[in-house]
Amino acid sequence: MNHEEVARRSAQTVWDGDLASRALGMRLGDVSPGLATVQMRVRDDMVNGHGICHGGLIATLADSAFAIACNTYDDVTVAAGFDVTFVAPAKPGDELTATAAERVRQGRSGLYDVTVRTADGSVIAEFRGRSRALGRRILP
């Protein structure tokens, strides 16, 4: 199996078990080794008291893309931490795309950047995640 196939199969296995992301209406997009996109439409029940998308849900979208990207090597990998910076608000009806890209993967540790954008390309948030591989395989 080549690297692209390992990435797709590993990502799909992780995604199939991610009930939380799917319950929020997230959809898995493109996947390749160390890269992933995840989309989510902002629903009316996702807004805070200011009428904009709750920051925790934007962070969750970015975290979901991060999780997929760092699990594209058939090695169970979890978050060790993340930071998120909110740049602009998202509104109900906005279609958001989180694009995660590996920056460094060395030993069992990784560093990933995720940008969340609206359909017109406006940046909503920047996220940096730190990962830790657990030394267990994803695929049977």
Image (cartoon, rainbow, N blue to C red):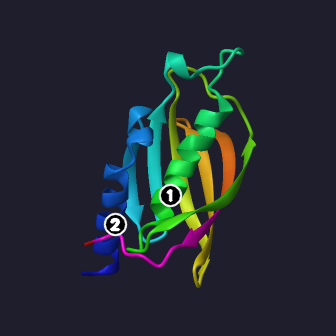
Q: Residue furthest bottom?
A: 107
| Left or right: 67, with 19 as reference point | right
Q: Is residue 59 visible?
A: yes
Residue at mark 1:
67
Say what amino acid the circle numbered 1 marks: Ala
- Corner quadrant of residue 58: top right
- Label tally: 2
Residue at mark 2:
10
In the displayed structure, 17 sits above or below 124; it is: below
- Corner quadrant of residue 20: top left
Say what amino acid the circle numbered 2 marks: Ser
In the displayed structure, 83 sits above or below 107; it is: above
| Left or right: 3, with 90 as reference point | left
Circle 2 packing at 10 Å, graded few (<14), some (14-19), many (20+), is many
Q: Is residue 134 magenta?
A: yes
Which contiguous range is marked in magenta? 129-139
Image quarter (top left, top right, bottom left or bottom right) of the C terminus: bottom left
- Corner quadrant of residue 33: bottom left
Image quarter (top left, top right, bottom left or bottom right) of the N terminus: bottom left
Image location of residue 43, percent across then percent down: 49, 21
Residue at image position (47%, 79%) is: 135
